[in-house]
Image (tube, helix red, strand yellow):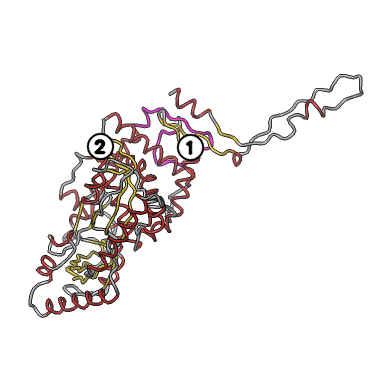
Amino acid sequence: MNKGFNFFSGLVVLSLLVGVSAKANHSPIANEDSDTTKVEVKEPTIPESSIIDEVIWVVGDEPILKSDVEAMRLQSEAQGVKWEGNPDCVIPEQMAVQKLFLHQAAIDSIDVPETEITQGIEDQINHWVQLIGSQEKLEEYRKQTIQQMREDMHDEFKNSKLVQKMREKLVEDITVTPAEVRNYFKNISQDSIPFVPTEVEVEILTQHPRIPIEEINRVKDELREYTDRVTKGETTFATLARMYSDDPESARQGGELGYTTRGILDPAFASVAFNLTDPKKISKIVESEFGFHIIQLIDKRGDKVNVRHILRKPKASYEVIDQTLSRLDSIANDIRAGKFTFEEGASIISDDKDTRNNRGLMSNLIMETRTRTSKFQMKDLPTEIARVVDTLKVDQISEPFKMIDNKGKTTCAIVKLKSRVEGHKATITEDFQVMREVVLNQRRQEALHDWVVDKIKHTYVRMNDRYKDCKFEYQGWVK
């Protein structure tokens, strides 16, 4: 408690006191021989706008800073988030609630493995890349390199996962019966029945443009030349990475990837990177799913390694891409003619290893629950695929098209729309699981709300006086 109180009493104030010396040098004087008239100097009231930062709430022994609230407000505005109520009240309350869950997670020894944090961040970044079209566009939009995103997201993602796991633990025993689901929806108005967005299932068959051996040898020769130049001391690895690497995010950092665990790296790349021992030596040429690399060790720290790399991607010519599209057109025609099914073709012909073993069926990672499903809302599909799928009827096969895959490579594809369920109001017969989740979520939210209210009663809370008139979601903050 004392720690929290000390935090709260400390304000970082930027002010310029003009005329501090006025009392000594410019006090009114009756005459040369008389005593100096004493003037009482009143301390000026410092306006709130002059305060750079301050602790506005303390929850337990954890402070909430004014700057934290402002940062969340700006981030929300950039993402188009609309707050229900006054953001100056809603945002710090949400932060305070998060601290309650984090405190309980620490008491219950809930932990998040580093590998889960790393993989979750990579999944989120890959999801953004798919939505926006490329890593370059994502970096431009967020005004950050991918590595900076990883670093900025780490603690926030970890805390988010801790809160999620704590919330899940608190409601893990809550269940609802079919009768409760039916009774709930029998008594609600039509306006309250949930709307189920359009969902599709999509199968994909891809063909990577075949890169001529001459183009591959050209790229390898370039990488050998870079190695020779660094070895001879003509230049540095970092300089060449900035100039020539096809990985724009790391190129800006001189090829540096930052401390990384083995699990998030391409297996072939990781095998070489983690076996490097001499920072003065450069690796052999490594082929990964992204292209060809040379790697230089910077440092090792526990189960993480920090390396530089230069990536070169062999380029497919327009002619080769056209040939690949033509080959896919023939495959699509054979499927339409009944020579084999789309699923058989995807299992044997497709170059996409992620869907090949699933007979071409694409899977959708739900970030909130970390579960996979074959159903996509249109907004969750990669942009190029969504554009094509939107024009198809069920069981129809698309014309071939080119796209950028999640490895940043140009690939060609055809897709088949396996199923499409138009957006509609949920019904008890067709959407029982959707309705069940609505009722279950309501029960869980009620339980979590009651838990927060009870937790507030037993937690030290102190806030700046100007927040005490806020309309809060939870009772008991003001004590």
Q: Are marks 2 and 1 in contact (CB under 8 Å)?
A: no
Q: Counting other residues with Cα less than 10 Å from the Cα at mark 2, is it few (<14), some (14-19), or many (20 or more)? A: few
Residue at left 18%, top 56%?
A: 432
Q: Nearer the viewer, mark 2 or mark 1?
A: 1
Q: In which quadrant will I find the C terminus? A: top left
Residue beneath label 1, please?
65
Q: Quadrant of residue 97?
A: top left
- Secondary structure of the residue carrying numbered label 1: strand
Q: Quadrant of residue 415?
A: bottom left
What's the amino acid at mark 1?
Leu
The picture places residue 450, in percent across and down from the top left corner, at 31, 37
Work out whether residue 110 or residue 138 is closer to the camera in this orientation and state it. Answer: 138
- Residue 170's label in the rendered image is 2
Compared across the picture, whether 373 is left or right of 386 comes to left
The residues tagged by marks 2 and 1 sit, at their Cα atoms, a distance apart of: 28 Å
- Secondary structure of the residue carrying numbered label 2: helix
Residue at left 47%, top 42%?
A: 69
Residue at left 18%, top 43%?
A: 175
Q: Which residues are magenta?
A: 454-477
What's the amino acid at mark 2?
Leu
